Amino acid sequence: MKIKETITVDYLVIGSGIAGLYMSKKLADTGFKTLLATEGIIGGGASFFPLKGTLGIQTTGDNLEDKIYFQEDISNMGNKMDNPEMVKTYIEESPAVPDSLKEIGFDPWLRDDKRPACFAKYPRNIYLIKDWNGSREKAQNILNSYENLIKFEHSQLIKIFTHKGEVTGAILKKKDKFIAIKTKIIVLCTGGIAGLYKNKLYPKDIKGIGHYLALDAGAQLTNMEFIQFIPGFIEPKYNVLFGEHTAKYSTGLYDENMKKILEGIDDSNLKKLWIERSSYAPFSFDFKSHLIDLKMMEVIEKNNRGVYIKFKKELYEDEGEFYRVYLNWLKNDLDIDMCRDNIMIAPFAHSCNGGIKIDINGKTDINGLYAIGEVASGIEGANRLGGNSVGGALVFGKRAVKHIENYLNNLTIKKYISNESIKNWIEGLYSKDGNDLYTSYEVEKKIKDILSKYGSIIREERNLNVGLEELKKLEQNFSLISNIELDGFETYYSLKMAQLLLTCMKNRKESRGSHYRKDYPYTENTPQKNYINKEIFL
């Protein structure tokens, strides 16, 4: 492993979803030299991975009552795992989000009807965006207009360097070339962790590597066990979002032999559960209707696939906009008819509610290191209110830009990474390398299988321990060095993140929100937030 090039910049932004695009544009506006590096192309990640026609963003309305209701919604669903200071900041500053979206090429519009978002009790303003290809092209043109902005596509962050609690630089891998970056500011916009799972409604390359590198640099992680799993299609077309609102027309769940395993909406004992389950997408222990998900998981644990769900013909007679838009999208774009076709569903990994611990300015525990978007633990808690993810990235991103500029302007001494620190890091990689028994491809596949088996909706101590042991054996028999020019770093960091997720699930001995423990099927009265730092995990 040799460093082929060294670049000095003022700002290094990692990731080019909505958070990364916004941070790159706003930091370049300050006039300082900025480098944007992304694994794919400019305009990627979950932001440009729409599950259906549009993406919604909740914002605060004009009156005090709406602010009170908004805080109530977020706090109720956070179930004591949210960050009240960040929630308050978001509620005050979210009205500026539509203008922030326009700055990076989107054209948001306000829905004509106010309606409650997923998990919300109260209706409020919801802005929508779409036209992913057109918006990506606009964003690329906007960034291309900056002479002080360098863009690296198909590049990976593989190391963050610090000295006495301050960022000093990083190492990027650009295809097969290793580049040292001297910088005092690194902004992580690397997204969530769902790419570690076999079934995910998410880009496959979003695997939590930013989380791991921040942890390695000295930052803390929190709430990592709270991962949203939402139903998706296994059949007739794989990896399609299941519209939860259709559940109130379900006639029941069926196993792979079409044997009914759960009655549907016509059963008077289950009607309330089905209606409740039709009001939110992700699994949540906080609702009684989670029993429907657990029944589904009983079958999936046996067949390792999914369950069939059938519907009453009245589904297609519902004239509600939410139904018409979704059902027409299925019909016109995917040729799927919910009553005609055999619909098999299963839980798919989606949003990560936890992440890197930050303050209201997006700053981590390390000076010069910031985390914006889903990679950070923001306003979410045990559950994530629909429509807050993009908004949170832009609210705290906007605050981060001001904090970053002030921090850089007040630095009197700029100490950067040294050749010696790079040399010591490389030598350390060789000294702890594993056996060369598995390829990156084999390890990545095994990670997905292990997490999907032991770290999905149903979790218990015995299985979590089995999963951790299997991951540790994989680590012992994988050589990062032998795969260093290909996907060695990505695979190694994926292994570490998979271990971290199972560890966090093991540490929380209760059921709350998106975290369910079969051996602890109750919620503790005195909740405790779990923090992971370098000393505890690495």
Image (cartoon, rainbow, N blue to C red):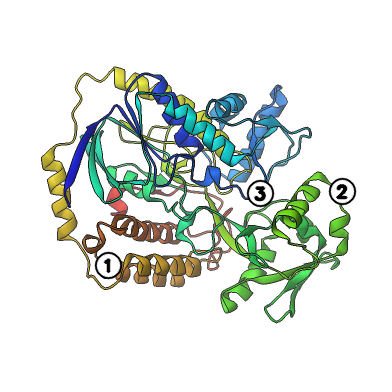
Give percent across and percent down for residue 458.
55, 66
- Position of 520 compared to 310: left or right? left
What residue sits right under mark 3 in the picture?
Answer: 52
Residue marked by disc 2: 319
Q: Which mark is residue 534?
A: none
Q: In front here: 280 or 174?
A: 174
Quadrant assignment, res 129? top right
Q: Amino acid at mark 2?
A: Glu
Q: Secondary structure at mark 1?
A: loop
Circles 2 and 1 in contact, beta carbons < 8 Å: no
Inter-mark Cα distance, 3 to 1: 38 Å
Looking at the figure, which quarter contains the C terminus?
Answer: bottom left
Mark 2 element type: loop
Q: Which label's residue is closer to the chain start, 2 or 1?
A: 2
Q: Are the residues at dot 3 and dot 1 in contact (C-beta closer than 8 Å)?
A: no
- Left or right: where does residue 186 sit relative to residue 381? left
Residue 478's disc is 1
Residue farthest toward the left in the current orientation of the protein: 420
User: Real-space Cα distance between discs 2 and 1?
Assistant: 55 Å
Which element is circle 3 on?
loop
- Could you classify mark 2 by the number of other residues whose Cα lies within 10 Å: few (under 14), some (14-19), or many (20 or more)? few
Q: Amino acid at mark 3?
A: Lys
Q: Can residue 68 be spotted in the picture?
A: yes
Location of residue 467 (image quadrant) = bottom left
Q: Confirm whether residue 84 shows in the render.
A: no
Vertical arrangement, residue 469 with respect to residue 25, above or below = below
Q: Amino acid at mark 1?
A: Phe
Q: Label 1: how many residues lie within 10 Å, few (<14), some (14-19) or many (20+)? A: many
Residue located 82% across and 64% down the image: 265
Residue 9 at what x, y percent from top left? Answer: 27, 29
Mark 2–mark 3 Cα distance, whole angstroms, equals 19 Å
